[in-house]
Structure formats: structure tokens, C-alpha cells
Image (spheres, helix red, strand yellow):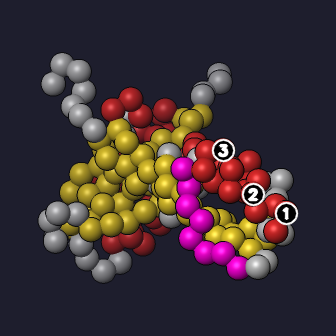
Amino acid sequence: MYTPIKQEIVSVLVKNQPNVLNRVTSLYGRRGFNIDSLTVSPTNDPGLSRITIAFTASETKMQQIITQTEKLEVVESITLMDRSNSLYRELLLLKVNATAEQRSAIKEIVEIYRAKIVDLTRASMIIELTGTPEKLNAFVDMMSEFDVTEVCRTGVAGIESHTKKGE
């Protein structure tokens, strides 16, 4: 039987202690999950940190890993992010070699995507873009016709924007 696989994003509130990140991520690795994106940040509570994990899984496997993550004593809560009521952002830094003739074409793409050129030398440009992972993917794809030398992405961060209907 075919089981659809899709990317899921979970938000895990954990106790702010040493080795917590390793404990959570090693659980995913031991269960055969590849983490596509990972961010860790402080919260408004100094005793808690938020780990945002993007991974690909079937519905059954996703429920299993969520249940197993909840059982870790360092985990306060885990939430499967609902794409319909959550906001996602990621930061991209992209370095591209650019001749004087290519700069105007690159600048046009940068403006269309509302990115910023944050560093410019005679030989290269560094571009900064914040947005959804899909927007960043599209930008990287557009820039692939140029000589991209480095790409650095922060990983996705997400937050629920409102409560679900009926709540």
C-alpha cells in the first residue's frame, strides 16, 4: 500500500539545559529520520528553548516520532505545525561571482525577490534574503544561471499565527 510522504515541521519546547539538542536530534537519527532543517532559539521563558525541526515522513512514522519525542524528559511540549495557520521564515545568504555586465541582471532579480545586496566587491556579491523556504528555493533556482559560490541558510523557524477554527 502506498503511503504518501511529505515534509512536516514540528516545534519542540525543551528545557534549556546542556546536551538537550543532541538528545532530541539523536532520537530522530536512531529512528532513521533525516532532518531537513533545524533551528534552535531562546523563548520568552529563560528556562525553555524552542527547537524547530523539518523532516520528511509518512503520516504513521510522523506520529511515531512525535510520540517518542514527547517521552523525552527534557521535552515540555511538541507541536506539529499546521501550514494553514503558521508563519515560516528562513534567512539565506548567497555569494555569487559577478562581472560588471552581470550585476544589473542580478540586481533586477534581487529587487523582484525583495532581497538585499549586503556586500559587493569587484568580483562578487553577497545577497541576503528572508522569506518562506519556497521563496528561498525559487530565488536560489533563479540565481543558478550565475556563478553561485556559496549558499548559507539558517533553517526554518515557525510560529502559529492564530488558533484553529472552532477554538
Residue 6 x %, y %: 56, 36
Badge 1 is on which residue? 101
Q: Which one is closest to the eye, mark 1 or mark 3? A: 1
Between the residue at mark 2 and the residue at mark 3, the CA separation in whole angstroms equals 19 Å
Q: What's under tag 1, amino acid-wise?
A: Glu
Q: Which one is closest to the eye, mark 2 or mark 3? A: 2
Residue 43 x %, y %: 22, 63
Element class at badge 3 = helix
Of marks 2 and 3, which one's residue comes earlier in the chain? 2
Residue 110 x %, y %: 63, 54
Tell me the quadrant of the picture where the C terminus can be found. top left
Residues 150 and 99: in front is: 99
Of marks 1 and 3, which one's residue comes earlier in the chain? 1
Residue 73 seen anywhere in this rendered image of the structure? no
Is 119 part of what is drawn in magenta?
Answer: yes
**Residue in the image at 30% along x and 61% along y:** 50
Near mark 2 (Cα within 10 A), the count class, few <14, some 14-19 or many ≥20, is few
Residues 125 and 37: in front is: 125
Magenta: predominant secondary structure element?
A: strand
Is 144 part of what is drawn in magenta?
Answer: no
**Residue in the image at 60% along x and 28% along y:** 4
Badge 3 is on which residue? 138
Q: Are marks 1 and 2 in contact (CB under 8 Å)?
A: yes
Total tally of numbered discs in the picture:
3
**Residue in the image at 34% along x and 51% along y:** 11
Q: In which quarter of the image is residue 124?
A: bottom right
Q: What's under tag 3, amino acid-wise?
A: Ala
Magenta span: 114-121
Badge 2 is on which residue? 104
